[in-house]
Image (cartoon, rainbow, N blue to C red):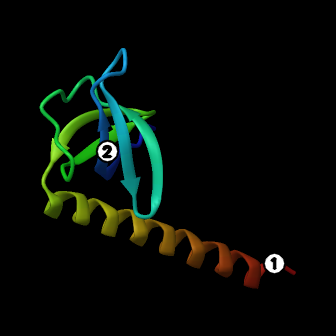
Amino acid sequence: MCLAVPGEVVAIDRHAALLSGTVDFGGTRRGVCLAYVPEVVVGDHVVVHVGFALSIVDEAEAARTWALLEELVAVDRELRLDGEREAP
């Protein structure tokens, strides 16, 4: 299964061999290749998979995706807690 995560572009390095920049993923910042989205500007939201920004999305779509990811984490935690309660 592949997972792409949205983040906000906070810096762009147009002088690198490949267009790259820094993307904020809910407080965690990572370097990302932006070569597939050359029109990107600081403040845009991008969908990132294995360090490559694949597309630009609007802020609302990024927020919806983050909300779904947070919901999945909550369900996972709940299922793990239920499993611990059932163990002998």
Q: Earlier in the sequence, mark 1 or mark 2?
A: 2
Which residue is pictured at 16% across the width and 48% down the height? 57
- Residue 71 % position (x, y): 40, 72
Disc 2: CA contacts within 10 A as few (<14), some (14-19) or many (>=20): some
Determine whether the residue tagged by mark 1 lies in a helix, strand or loop.
Answer: loop
Disc 1: CA contacts within 10 A as few (<14), some (14-19) or many (>=20): few
Locate residue 46: give its quadrant. top left
In this rendering, would 3 be left or right of 82? left
Label 1 amino acid? Ala
Query: Label 2: which residue?
Result: 11
Relative vertical location of residue 44 with respect to residue 82 in this rendering, above or below? above
The disc placed on residue 47 is none
Q: Residue furthest top?
A: 17
Query: Label 1: which residue?
Result: 87
- Residue 16 % position (x, y): 36, 21
Q: Nearer the viewer, residue 47 or 77?
A: 47
Determine whether the residue tagged by mark 2 lies in a helix, strand or loop.
Answer: strand
